[in-house]
Amino acid sequence: MTGMQRSSSDLDVRRRKALFRSWHRGIREMDLVLGRFADAEIDRLTDAELHDYEQLMEAPDRDIFQWLTGETATPANFDTGVFRRIRDFHVAEEEPRP
């Protein structure tokens, strides 16, 4: 997968911007982490969850990556339900399928 896979035509402006930002992080690894999550989940996030997601995207890519991999502890203000969904989304994606 090399880039955005979902159309944003059915999304409101706020979600379109979040989807775009998810795929244009500056570090390819984070494009894939946040972009894949956004492709699958952006339309399911509540307004409060979208707010948490937007706040997470303000953090530096290196920090987010270290939090997701467990290299460093996730600060309480970023350890939200959305952050855990992103982490769980990628753990499930990596598990072997029967």
Image: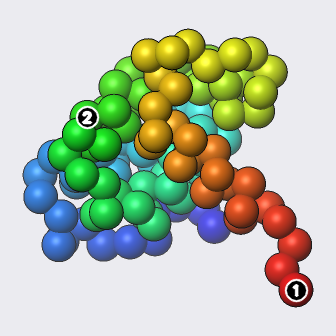
- Coordinates of residue 90 in the picture (x, y in percent): 67, 54
Tag 2 or tag 1, which sits nearer the N-term?
A: 2
Determine the image quadrant of residue 54.
top left
Q: Label 1, on which residue?
A: 98
> Is residue 62 shown to the viewer in this render?
no
Location of the N terminus by quadrant is: bottom right
Q: Residue at x 51, y 15 (%)?
A: 76
Q: Name the outermost residue toward the left.
A: 13
In the image: residue 95, left or right of residue 45: right
Task: Tell me, for residue 51, which label it has, or none.
Answer: 2
- Coordinates of residue 47 in the picture (x, y in percent): 19, 45
**Label 1 vs label 2: CA separation?**
36 Å
Q: Regarding mark 1 in the picture, which secondary structure is present there? A: loop
The residue type indicated by label 1 comes to Pro
* Tag 1–tag 2 contact (CB < 8 Å): no
- Coordinates of residue 2 in the picture (x, y in percent): 60, 62
Q: Residue at x 71, y 23 (%)?
A: 66
In front: 25, or 96? Answer: 96
Q: Regarding mark 2 in the picture, which secondary structure is present there? A: helix
> Is residue 49 shown to the viewer in this render?
yes
In the image: residue 74, left or right of residue 52: right
Q: How many marks?
A: 2
Q: Residues within 10 Å of mark 2 (few under 14, many from 20)?
A: some
The residue type indicated by label 2 comes to His
Q: Residue at x 67, y 25 (%)?
A: 67
- Coordinates of residue 4 in the picture (x, y in percent): 45, 63
Task: Tell me, for residue 38, which label it has, or none.
Answer: none
Location of the C terminus by quadrant is: bottom right
In front: 21, or 84? Answer: 84
